[in-house]
Amino acid sequence: MIRQLIEQHRRLEVSLDALLAMLGPTPQARTELGSRFHDAASIALAHYDFEDRGLFDSLRSEMPAFVAKLEAQHDEVRELSQAVTELLRADVMGERERSDLLLLCRRFVAMAQHNIIEEERDFFPLVAIRNTSGWGA
């Protein structure tokens, strides 16, 4: 299972990098930015749903604080995703809205990257130890 989650992380990182490349000083077309964002968000949210339903449910009683921390990160990325989606749907995109959009997209990328790091550095090793040692069985 950990290998599958890491593969999902690599796909997400590629998508996040593509989105981040669009957030530079050169204005990008709203439709292209939206497309890149939706690609990254769909990968992230599917990955989080998989972890929340499968992995976290089975570990909540053994690592409640750690699971709660990762779920909070997932929730924050979901909230950012919703806020970006709402801005992308707006009829008018003035300078303020564009600035807000870029800021929220950057925050989305940063939080998703932070979650990847924490899971791979701290959480996945604990899950691997649990699975090989029979801990929690």
Image: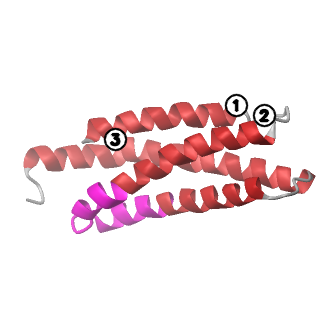
Residue 86 location in percent, x, y? 71, 60
Real-space Cα separation, disc 1 to disc 3, in angstroms: 24 Å
Assess disc 1: are there few (<14), some (14-19) or many (≥20) residues with their C-alpha within 10 Å of its C-alpha: some
Q: Secondary structure under badge 2?
A: loop
- The main secondary structure of the magenta stretch is helix
User: In the image, 57: left or right of 7?
Assistant: left
Q: Mark 1 points at which residue?
A: 21
The numbered dot on residue 24 is 2
Q: Are marks 2 and 1 in contact (CB under 8 Å)?
A: yes
Real-space Cα separation, disc 2 to disc 1, in angstroms: 6 Å
Residues rendered magenta in the picture: 51-73
Q: Name the residue under label 3.
A: 5
Q: How many labels does the image show?
A: 3
**Is residue 83 magenta-colored?**
no
Q: Secondary structure under badge 1?
A: helix
Camera-side residue: 72 or 57? Answer: 57
Q: Which residue is drawn at 23% across and 49% down?
A: 127
